[in-house]
Every structure is written in structure tokens, then in C-alpha cells.
Image (cartoon, grey):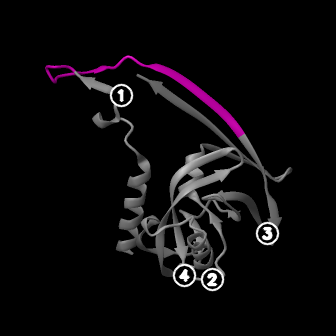
Amino acid sequence: MIRITIILLLISMIFSGCSGCSKSGRYKKKNSGSQPTEVASTKRQFSGKTIIKMTKENGVYKIPVLINGLNMVFIFDTGAGLISISNVEASYLYKQGKLTKEDILGKAEFIDANGDISVGTIIKLKEVTIGDRTIYDINASVVNNSIAPLLFGQSALEQFGKISIDYNNNTVTFEWNILLLYY
């Protein structure tokens, strides 16, 4: 249990970013080294929506996702911590040249919905695309099970910004605001 807590803590640290640290480039120290002064910048904000049609199969909603350039259909799973794929999909990605040895990050222990602990492999997906929006370098787990479902979890969902589900129309809407700073 302690291993899982440590792994989850490390994963959250990786995705938390550095919004106010001195290495972020937002501030430049004066020569005296006392108070930071803001560097002149121009701010530009972009926003948009991507609406994706979900299909309902056996009580779960599925969405189309492009993983490293290959089409796949994932269960939309807000309860999953990471994108999760079976060893069959990982092997397919590898054989197609869409996953390399450098993308294999290591092993981790996972707790499934039944409370069982299993060992899986953490990989890096270079590109994850939903509709017209692509995110990069997203961690995913490979389950050592050939029939494990594809789960689209929080490692990707949190990168897409605001998410809303319309069960009447079977759609999920991804909304984002991107603030760009020019120096």
C-alpha cells in the first residue's frame, strides 16, 4: 500500500508542473537579487471547444481517440488514473513503430476496481488526439492482460481542461483556454 501511495504521489508531482517557481521564466531577478521584477510580456488567450460523439456499449461510454497516429476506441473513464491499454495494444503500437523502447518508463503497482493489486508497465504516449486537439507525452499503463479494456483516464483528461458530458445527445465537450506569454 505504501508503494502505491508513493507511486501516486510521484505521478501527481510529474503532472503538477511549476507554475510559480523561479525556473518558469515568468520573473527575472534584479542584479541585487532581492525582489523579482516582472519581465515585459504580451499575453494572448486562445479558447475552443471540441465536441465528441460517444457511443454507449454494455453500459459504458466509448470515445474515438488517436494514439500516436493510430485510431482506437476507449472507454471514457473519469475514475481511471491513467490511460490504460492491454499488452495486445502495446504490442501492436510497438510493431507499428508507434511505441519505442525509449517510451517504456518502468513498472508500477495498480489497484483495480476490485481492490486487487497488479503490476503494470508505465509508457509514454507521444501524441493523444481527440477531435482537433492533441496533447503530448502522456503517461499510460500497460496491463498484463490481453483482454483488458482501453480506458481513457485522468492522465489525459486533466490535460484537456474543462470537460462536460451531455447524456441526452451522447456527447462529451472538451473546452480549453490557452494563455500564451510572449517575451
Q: Which mark is residue 59?
A: 3
Q: Where is mark 1, residue-wise?
A: 26
Please report whichever mark, 3 or 1, sits nearer to the chain's N-terminal start. 1
Out of 58 and 159, give the one closest to the viewer. Answer: 159
Secondary structure beneath label 2: loop
Residue 177 appears left or right of 42: right
Residue contact at pointers 2 and 3, CB within 8 angstroms: no
Cα–Cα span, label 3 and label 1: 47 Å
Please report whichever mark, 2 or 3, sits nearer to the chain's N-terminal start. 3
Q: Which residues are magenta?
A: 30-49
Under mark 2, the amino acid is Ser
Please report whichever mark, 1 or 2, sits nearer to the chain's N-terminal start. 1
Crowd around label 2: few <14 · some 14–19 · many ≥20 (10 Å)? few
Q: Quadrant of residue 127?
A: bottom right
Task: Residue 102: give x, y in percent of width and height.
Answer: 42, 65
Instruction: Name the residue at 42% across, 55% down.
Output: 12
Q: Quadrant of residue 90?
A: bottom right
Under mark 4, the amino acid is Asn
Crowd around label 4: few <14 · some 14–19 · many ≥20 (10 Å)? some
Residue 37 appears left or right of 83: left
Under mark 3, the amino acid is Gly
Q: Where is mark 2, residue-wise?
A: 146
Relative to 86, say whether 7 is above or below: above
Q: Where is mark 4, residue-wise?
A: 144
Secondary structure beneath label 4: loop
Relative to 100, say whether 161 is above or below: above
Cα–Cα span, label 3 and label 4: 24 Å
